[in-house]
Amino acid sequence: MIPNTKISHTILEFGKSIILQLPDDYSKEEFEAAISIVIVVWNALVMDAWNETDKFERELMERLEEGPKQAKIEVRRLIKRKKAKFSTDLRAVGNYWVKEQDGEYIFGCEARGNVENFPAEKTKH
């Protein structure tokens, strides 16, 4: 099933635990760093689902092995959240951006799909 929500909205909802940890006066660079972590985790799990493996999740956790303990905890929480609440959303994030407008940061991104596995029934051609 193809989700009917914008991927940018879904990513913000998925990553809200990370985003809410930003300081009140966070900069554009801090927001971009946080959202990039969220997207890396999301895309790793989506690509694993596409390929019916856990390769990207394992590689992600291996790369964090030398990092701060808190980073590993946060990434594990995101992984658990993706699997529990967003498991049926198999869109990957392609290009993404953060723009500043009227003192607010606007996030946008493009969805990418594994076209080989998208359902074609009830599609008008």
Image (cartoon, helix red, strand yellow):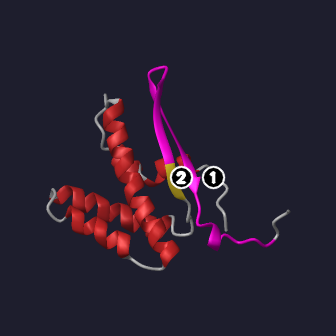
Q: Is residue 19 left or right of residue 63?
A: right
* Vertical order, 16 against 51 (above or below): above
Q: Quadrant of residue 80?
A: bottom left
Q: CA distance from mark 1 to mark 2?
A: 7 Å
* Vertical order, 70 against 33 (above or below): below
Q: Which mark is residue 10?
A: 2
Instruction: Inspect the magenta stretch and tell me whether residue 88 lies in it.
Output: no
- Residue, x 59% and y 62% (percent of image)? 113
Q: Which mark is residue 35?
A: none
Q: Quadrant of residue 62?
A: bottom left
* Residue 98 locus on image (x, y percent): 45, 35
- Residue at disc 1, secondary structure: loop
- Residue at disc 2, secondary structure: helix
Mark 1, other Cα within 10 Å: few <14 / some 14–19 / many ≥20: few
Quadrant placement of the N terminus: bottom right
Quadrant placement of the C terminus: bottom right
The residue that label 1 is drawn on is 5
* Residue 92 locus on image (x, y percent): 52, 59
Q: How many marks?
A: 2
Q: Which residues are magenta?
A: 95-121
Three-letter code, disc 2: Thr
Do tag 1 and tag 2 residues touch (Cβ < 8 Å)? Answer: yes
Three-letter code, disc 1: Thr
* Residue 42 locus on image (x, y percent): 43, 60
Instruction: Inspect the magenta stretch and tell me whether residue 110 lies in it.
Output: yes
Q: Quadrant of residue 31?
A: top left
Mark 2, other Cα within 10 Å: few <14 / some 14–19 / many ≥20: some
First in residue order: circle 1 vs circle 2: 1
- Residue, x 66% and y 63% (percent of image)? 2
